């Protein structure tokens, strides 16, 4: 009987501990609230979205192509003048 009372007492302590931890979890924001907070942070920081990044990559690739073509033309013209 005494052993049963001890186990009941231990279970009560563990249940109390679990209830305290659950109360702390109730204070945490839910999934949609977290998504909203992340979205607001991204908007407020002016972080680049996918379209902006793709546009900048296209621009830089175009500039690189123009410089490459210009360099090739310059080398060809210089080679022709030397001959």
Image (tube, rainbow, N blue to C red):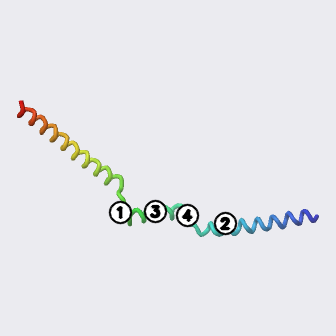
Left or right: 15 as drawn, with respect to 76: right
Image quadrant where residue 52 sits: bottom left
Mark-to-mark CA distance, 2 and 3: 24 Å
Q: Give whichever of discs 1 and 3 has the lower sequence position.
A: 3
Q: Give whichever of discs 4 and 2 has the lower sequence position.
A: 2
83 to 55, vertically: above or below:
above
Label 4 environment density (alpha carbons within 10 Å; few <14, some 14–19, many ≥20): few
3 vs 4, front mark: 3
Question: What residue did someone put label 3 on?
Answer: 38
Question: What residue did someone put label 2 on?
Answer: 22
Please report the residue visible at 12 percent of the width from the left and 39 percent of the height from the top.
Answer: 74
Question: What residue did someone put label 4 on?
Answer: 30
Which part of the image, by quadrant, shows the N terminus?
bottom right
Q: Give whichever of discs 2 and 3 has the lower sequence position.
A: 2
The answer to whether marks 2 and 3 mark residues whose Cβ atoms lie closer than 8 Å is no
**Of the pair 51 and 64, the residue shown nearer to us:** 64
The spot of residue 71 in percent (x, y) is 16, 40
Label 2 environment density (alpha carbons within 10 Å; few <14, some 14–19, many ≥20): few
Which part of the image, by quadrant, shows the C terminus?
top left
Mark-to-mark CA distance, 1 and 3: 12 Å
Query: Secondary structure under badge 2?
Result: helix
- Count of number-bearing discs: 4
Q: Give whichever of discs 2 and 1 has the lower sequence position.
A: 2
Query: Secondary structure under badge 3?
Result: helix
Q: Give whichever of discs 3 and 4 has the lower sequence position.
A: 4
Mark-to-mark CA distance, 4 and 1: 25 Å
Q: Residue furthest top?
A: 83
4 vs 1, front mark: 1
**Of the pair 60 and 33, the residue shown nearer to us:** 60
Question: What residue did someone put label 1 on?
Answer: 46
The answer to whether marks 2 and 1 mark residues whose Cβ atoms lie closer than 8 Å is no
């Amino acid at each position: 009987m005494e052993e049963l009372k001890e186990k009941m007492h231990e279970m009560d302590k563990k249940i109390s501990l679990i209830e305290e931890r659950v109360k702390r979890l109730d204070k945490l924001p839910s999934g949609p609230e977290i998504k909203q907070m992340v979205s607001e942070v991204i908007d407020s920081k002016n972080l680049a979205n996918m379209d902006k990044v793709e546009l900048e990559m296209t621009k830089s690739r175009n500039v690189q192509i123009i410089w490459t073509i210009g360099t090739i033309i310059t080398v060809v013209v210089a080679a022709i003048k030397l001959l």
